[in-house]
């Protein structure tokens, strides 16, 4: 990939030095989004056209329409003004050195990135669950006396996760390459901020290397998602034989 004129080192070594932070931030953001979005989507689908469903849909629309930099600035403002807490900025403690310090530095940027992602997961989960709840096997499970909890979480949800997995793969790729603004707001020395600095300093070799590296990771993530389909849906394994 060449040598960075800014750092005087090979581009790949500079990228690999910054990538662990961005990867950890993307994973944490995805975990937050899935832990919020999937239960919210299931809740909205099981209470379709009720006040709970309306509230979830409005919040999901608000989450999708709010830019990430606005969410980040609001988090910093609320924490600093009303709670007197200033998020740790400008430094990064690796996970293996101090897990608590690492989490304290990444939790608010991860919430910022995961906010819009959670909204998308909520809408996709709700739509998929509404389709699955009207399938014959769900009615059969209910007619056999299965509890509502078992029908929803054991029979319906696994089959509704395929669209969620697809969205998660695409969004995870975007998280790896789209953390530029969030890393800049919270002063995190990740891959996104590295790319932004390289653009401002006209370090073309580093910019090209970062773009190529993010594109490669995007392809790898989508390949893993395709392989995960077969684990979630046995019909895909049978259809490939």
Image: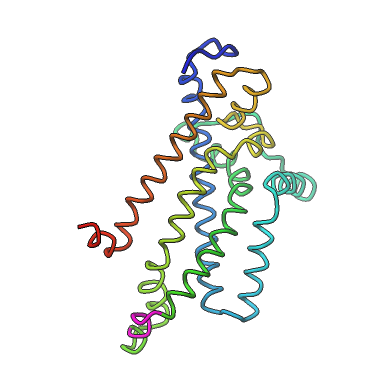
Quarter where residue 189 is shown: top right
On whether residue 91 falls in the magenta region, the answer is no
Q: Magenta part of the protein: which range? A: 135-140
Q: How far across and down, in percent of the image, does residue 59 sit?
A: 66, 64
Q: Is residue 26 above or below residue 124?
A: above
Q: Position of residue 194 (x, y in %)?
A: 59, 26
117 left or right of 143?
right
62 lies above or below 51: above
Q: Is residue 157 above or below residue 231?
A: below
Report the side of 238 relative to 188 (left or right).
Answer: left
Q: Determine the main secondary structure of the stretch shown in magenta.
A: helix
Q: Identify the residue at image location x=70%, y=49%.
A: 67
Q: Residue at x 71, y 40 (%)?
A: 86
Residue 182 placement, left or right of 38: right
Left or right, 187 with reference to 156: right
Residue 143 at x, y percent in the picture: 34, 89
Which quadrant holds residue 181?
A: top right
Outermost residue, left side: 241
- Residue 202 falls in which quadrant of the image? top right
- Identify the image quadrant of the C terminus: bottom left
Q: Indicate the colouring scheme.
A: rainbow
Given residues 166 and 104, the one toward you in this image is 166
Foreground of the two, 190 or 208:
208
Picture residue at 57% right of the left edge, 58% below the top: 120
Residue at position x 61%, y 49% from top? Answer: 111
- Residue 84 place in picture, x, y as percent: 76, 45
């Amino acid at each position: 990939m060449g040598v960075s004129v800014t750092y005087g080192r090979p581009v790949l070594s500079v990228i690999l030095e910054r990538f662990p932070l961005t990867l950890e931030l993307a994973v944490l953001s995805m975990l937050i989004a899935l832990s919020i979005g999937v239960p919210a989507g299931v809740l909205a689908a099981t209470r379709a056209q009720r006040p709970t469903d309306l509230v979830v849909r409005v919040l999901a629309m608000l989450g999708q329409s709010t830019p990430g930099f606005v969410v980040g600035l609001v988090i910093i403002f609320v924490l600093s003004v009303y709670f007197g807490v200033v998020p740790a900025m400008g430094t990064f403690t690796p996970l293996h050195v101090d897990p608590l310090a690492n989490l304290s530095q990444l939790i608010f940027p991860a919430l910022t990135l995961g906010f819009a992602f959670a909204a998308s997961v909520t809408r996709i989960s709700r739509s998929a669950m509404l389709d699955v709840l009207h399938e014959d096997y769900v009615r059969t499970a209910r007619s056999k006396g299965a509890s509502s909890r078992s029908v929803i979480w054991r029979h319906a949800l696994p089959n509704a996760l395929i669209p969620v997995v697809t969205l998660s793969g695409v969004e995870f790729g975007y998280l790896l390459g789209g953390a530029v603004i969030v890393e800049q707001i919270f002063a995190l020395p990740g891959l996104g901020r590295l790319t932004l600095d390289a653009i401002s300093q006209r370090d073309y070799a580093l910019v090209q290397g970062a773009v190529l590296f993010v594109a490669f990771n995007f392809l790898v993530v989508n390949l893993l998602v395709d392989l995960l389909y077969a684990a979630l849906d046995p019909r895909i394994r049978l259809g490939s034989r």
